[in-house]
Image: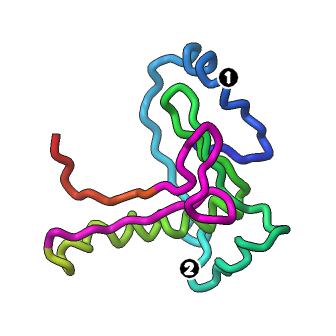
Amino acid sequence: MLAHHSLRFPTASWKEVRARLGRGRPHTTATPDDDFPDESSIDHRRRTWPTYRDHLAFDIAVHTLFVTGSPTAFREHGTALRDLVTRAPSHSHHHPPPSHFCVELSSGPWPGTRARRGVPGQLHIQYVGEWRA
């Protein structure tokens, strides 16, 4: 589940909120291509500045991972996810198996730190063309 940090959704209340939800139905949405900055225009060094606040944060409640952050954090990390979605399907054609295509999203300014409630501070998202059961 994704949310903006200023909404201050209390993840501890997720169990009650989820219990009130119905089955739901699938939705599809699109994000404009120009909403994500070009990778070369992102200043990754500024994420280590003490005054920088646009980090993602991870939390977990009732087996649900919550990713929160500012619009800037989502746009900058979304650039990596967009790259995964657009480049990964053809990656195995250019690099024979076993090939590995992934992105890593970090929580906070320092990679490797742990988020709240022992949630790892880094998410490793790997593209797999065919899932095996």
Sequence-first tag of 1 and 2:
1
In the rendered image, residue 54, in percent from the top left (x then y), is placed at: 74, 62
| Rendering colour mode | rainbow
Point 55% across, 14% down: residue:
19
Front residue of 1/59: it is 59
Say which amino acid is labelled 2.
Glu
Q: Is residue 41 left or right of residue 101?
A: right
Q: Which mark is residue 13?
A: 1
Would you identify the image quadrant in which residue 92 lies?
bottom left
- Number of marks drawn: 2
Q: Is residue 131 left or right of residue 73?
A: left
Point 22% across, 70% down: residue:
99
In the rendered image, residue 107, in percent from the top left (x then y), is placed at: 62, 56
* The N terminus, quarter of image: top right
Q: What is the span of residues highlighted in magenta in the rendered image?
A: 97-123
Point 26% across, 74% down: residue:
91
Would you identify the image quadrant in which residue 117 lies?
top right
Q: Is residue 116 magenta?
A: yes
Q: Is residue 22 above or below residue 127?
A: above
Say which amino acid is labelled 1.
Ser
Q: Is residue 84 magenta?
A: no
Element under disc 2: helix
Front residue of 98/81: it is 98
In the rendered image, residue 89, in percent from the top left (x then y), is placed at: 27, 66
Residue, far bottom: 40
Element under disc 1: helix
Would you identify the image quadrant in which residue 87 lies?
bottom left
* The C terminus, quarter of image: top left
Q: Residues within 10 Å of mark 1 (few under 14, many from 20)?
A: few
In the rendered image, residue 88, in percent from the top left (x then y), is placed at: 32, 68
Q: Which residue is mark 2?
A: 39
